[in-house]
Amino acid sequence: MPTIAQDLELVKARIAQAAARSKRSVDDIELVAVTKTHSAETVREAIDAGHLLFGESKVQEARTKIPLLPSNLRWHFIGHLQKNKVRHALPLFELIHSVDSLELAQAIDRIAHDDGLHPRILLEVNVAGEASKFGFEPDKLRQEMESLLALPRLSIEGLMCIPPLGQDAEASRKYFVTLRELRNRFENEFELKLPQLSMGMTNDYTVAIEEGATLIRVGTAIFGERRRAHSEVRHLA
Ligand SMILES: *Cc1c(COP(=O)(O)O)cnc(C)c1O
């Protein structure tokens, strides 16, 4: 079995190839190594291989894992965030990828005000209109954008999506295009910059890079299969 260091090298090589194919600089693409369900010891193997940016999808798990690891790491939150977990999440994560409602954004803004923080966030879009998924419907997001932009503590840096799970990476392409075009439309309409596109997971990250991803969230290709992978996917869905 390949080591985590070897898996990381392979993922980074494929990132470089996808960047070259699409004439993008590899420096514009960040790899978020998704460590959910994996132990601090396992994360340490990636750290030893030189990786410093990690993603977690549950606040409780992150609260136990992150303190066991060096303090120079960067952590991104990528899961559904419950309002009652915001206060614990904010100090742990430099970026929240998955703000999926105006109510959640308002809660984050309020708590950030109380605690003297200025959180960086992305807005999660339900690109395929799946009933089972979290995220803003594109039209709803457009309607609520002014209210989101008015929240003084939040720095809204871009959009995120989780397309329907499929075996075929190409099946995700149209959803990645949808997210990029939505971003472009919002930048024009609201005269702002949304530089970050968080899209692409183990099965489709090279396609996501071809379509403009700046943050890819990769777990399985680095750390191997998760136990309970199926229930989890339903959970994040
Ligand atoms: C678990 C998870 C990932 C990583 O998925 P892999 O298929 O293991 O790469 C990416 N994004 C989110 C939101 C996740 O919950």
Image (spheres, rainbow, N blue to C red):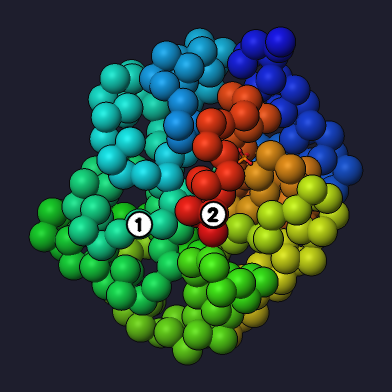
| Amino acid at dot 2 | Arg
Work out which residue is located at the far right of the displayed protein and give it: 21
Q: Is residue 179 visible?
A: yes
Work out which residue is located at the far bottom of the displayed protein and give it: 143
- Quadrant holding ligand 1? top right
Compared across the picture, whether 70 is left or right of 57 comes to: left
Say which of 29 and 165 sits in front.
165
Say which of 113 and 105 sits in front.
105
Q: Which residue is mark 1?
A: 81
Residue sitting at x 57%, y 39%: 229
Above or below: residue 85 compared with residue 133 = above
Residue sitting at x 67%, y 30%: 221
Q: Which residue is mark 2?
A: 234
| Amino acid at dot 1 | Leu
Query: Tag 1, which secondary structure?
Result: loop
Query: Tag 2, which secondary structure?
Result: helix
Q: Position of residue 120 (x, y in %)?
A: 38, 55
Quarter that holds the C terminus:
bottom right
Residue sitting at x 39%, y 27%: 73
The quadrant holding residue 32 is top right
Q: Position of residue 235 (x, y in %)?
A: 48, 53
Say which of 2 and 206 sits in front.
2
